[in-house]
Image (cartoon, rainbow, N blue to C red):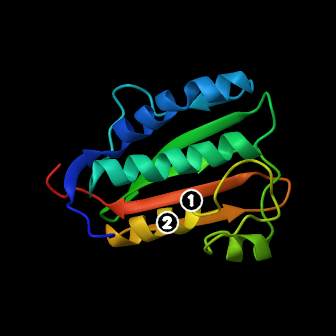
């Protein structure tokens, strides 16, 4: 059931919460998560719980696939009535073919044995689209990946 009840949320706050929840796992691997700073805000119309689920998936993937001792960034962007959060990592990056497949159901990109279901990105994109948004990726081999969660901005904010 992908029906959502939209709320007025602060995308910056949800990003900070996701970073906080996964902070211990990141630190265990020597990975620093650079979350939006306190005071940064990004008003959006979306369902808090769903957005947190998507960001936990994106940050969890970044922790899993990025080298020990590297960094993950959660950056905010707004424009033309949209609110965006970008999760960027310093992993091995994705080829054009991998980018085309990464949102398919059960797609594992040949990465096995890490306990993931392969459902995360497929479901995350469905959730984003159900909220009037989207989830896309920009990457190149050797240059890490940038997953972009795009949601409707809050015009009243």
Residue 36 as seen in the image, left or right of residue 121: left
Residue 43 as seen in the image, left or right of residue 24: left
Measured as percent of width and height from the top left, residue 45 is found at: 24, 57
Check disc 2: other Cα within 10 Å, few if <14, some if 14-19, many if 20+.
some
Determine the secondary structure under disc 2.
helix
* Residue identified by numbered label 2: 123
Q: Are marks 2 and 1 in contact (CB under 8 Å)?
A: yes
* Residue identified by numbered label 1: 120
Measured as percent of width and height from the top left, residue 66 is found at: 76, 42
* Distance from the alpha carbon under mark 2 to that under mark 1: 5 Å
Identify whether 90 is placed above or below 156. above
What's the residue at 76%, 71% (across, down)?
98
What's the residue at 44%, 71% (across, down)?
126
Badge count: 2
> Quadrant location of residue 105?
bottom right
What's the residue at 66%, 45% (across, down)?
62
Residue 108 as seen in the image, left or right of residue 23: right
Measured as percent of width and height from the top left, residue 63 is found at: 68, 39
């Amino acid at each position: 059931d992908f029906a959502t009840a939209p709320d007025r949320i602060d995308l910056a706050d949800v990003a900070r919460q996701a970073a906080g929840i996964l902070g211990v796992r990141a630190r265990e691997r020597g990975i620093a998560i650079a979350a939006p700073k306190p005071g940064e805000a990004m008003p959006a119309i979306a369902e808090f719980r769903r957005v947190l689920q998507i960001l936990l998936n994106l940050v969890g993937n970044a922790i899993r696939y990025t080298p020990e001792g590297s960094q993950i960034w959660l950056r905010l962007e707004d424009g033309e009535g949209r609110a965006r959060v970008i999760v960027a990592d310093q992993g091995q990056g994705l080829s054009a073919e991998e980018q085309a497949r990464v949102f398919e159901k059960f797609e594992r990109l040949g990465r096995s044995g890490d306990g993931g279901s392969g459902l995360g990105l497929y479901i995350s994109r469905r959730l984003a689209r159900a909220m009037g948004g989207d989830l896309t990726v920009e990457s190149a081999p050797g240059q890490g990946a940038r997953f972009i969660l795009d949601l409707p901005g809050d015009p009243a904010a």
